[in-house]
């Protein structure tokens, strides 16, 4: 069996897909087999599948892809559907069991985004029990969002293997100041800093997975 990681974030549009795609490309450049999955997705346009996050990580859309750009539970409801949480976990576990290289499972939205009336992305992560990469930003307010996400994960026994600080564009807060505030509060969780043009950093992170 290969290695599998779950990529989640403290919120939406923070770089999960960018990180997933970048790590996959870096691994393949190193000659390692790697593939990505985006099991749940909202804001999916079936008429333009090439523009979707699925396409960006080289994955096929699943039964849990919905048109409305909102939380998955509501996006599914707009189509008269709901997410079968047990089926989602079962499907992911089958993919994990069949994996022989590096498998990256990209979540949807942030850690506490609702999937059903009873389950959030956090429950999905806990059920799979695989290493987690948590992506955060450097925008004003990111510190609270990041520490809240870490606390939420720890409540269910999940400690991220890495905290990926992805520098937010046009942020009024520097990467250095963000790190200075974060470090005393994250415990033993390793922090990795990445700028969007940091190919060397992506390659180094990929080598460590």
Image (cartoon, rainbow, N blue to C red):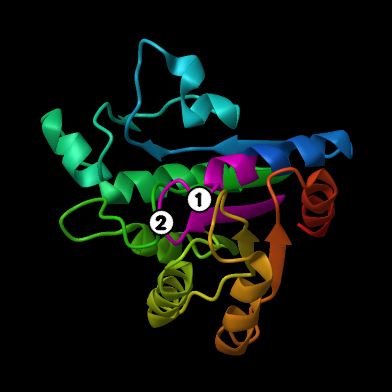
In this orientation, which residue lies closer to the viewer: 151 or 5? 151
Please identify the quadrant where the C terminus is shown.
bottom right
Point 84% across, 54% down: residue = 204
Q: Relative to 204, is 78 on the left or the right?
A: left
Residue at horizontal 65%, vertical 85%? 188
Image coordinates of residue 114 in percent, x first then y, are: 25, 55
Please state the horizontal and vertical placement of residue 186, each as a whole percent of the image: 57, 83
Crowding around mark 2 (Cα neighbors within 10 Å: few <14, some 14 to 19, many 20+) is many
Residue 14: assigned label: 1
Residue 34: say if magenta: no
Q: Is residue 105 above or below residue 49?
A: below
Judging by the rendered image, the residue that carries numbered circle 2 is: 11
Q: Is residue 103 visible to the viewer in this orientation of the structure?
A: yes
Left or right of 44? Residue 77 is: left
Residue at 47% x, 46% y is 92
What's the CA distance linking mark 1 and mark 2? 7 Å
- Quarter of the view holding residue 182: bottom right
Element at badge 1? loop
Cβ atoms at labels 1 and 2 below 8 Å apart = yes
Which segment did they paint magenta?
1-20
Which disc, if any, is residue 136? Answer: none
Residue density around tag 1, few if under 14, some if 14–19, many if 20 or more, within 10 Å:
many
* Residue 123 percent across, percent down from the top left: 35, 63
């Amino acid at each position: 069996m290969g290695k599998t990681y779950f990529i989640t974030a403290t919120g939406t549009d923070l770089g999960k897909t960018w990180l997933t795609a970048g790590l996959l490309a870096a691994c393949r450049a190193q000659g390692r087999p790697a593939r990505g999955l985006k099991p749940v997705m909202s804001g999916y346009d079936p008429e333009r599948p090439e523009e979707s996050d699925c396409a960006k990580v080289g994955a096929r859309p699943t039964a849990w892809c919905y048109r409305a750009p909102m939380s998955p539970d509501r996006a599914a409801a707009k189509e008269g559907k709901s997410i079968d949480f047990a089926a989602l976990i079962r499907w992911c576990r089958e993919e994990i069991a069949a994996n022989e290289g590096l498998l990256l499972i990209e979540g949807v939205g942030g850690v506490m985004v609702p999937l059903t009336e009873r389950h959030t992305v956090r429950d999905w992560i806990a059920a799979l029990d695989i290493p987690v990469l948590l992506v955060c930003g450097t925008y004003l307010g990111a510190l609270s969002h990041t520490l809240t996400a870490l606390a939420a994960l720890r409540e269910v026994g999940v400690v991220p293997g890495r905290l990926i600080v992805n520098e937010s564009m046009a942020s009024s807060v520097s990467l250095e100041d963000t790190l200075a505030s974060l470090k005393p509060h994250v415990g033993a969780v390793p922090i990795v800093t990445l700028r969007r043009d940091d190919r060397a950093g992506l390659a180094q992170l990929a080598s460590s997975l």
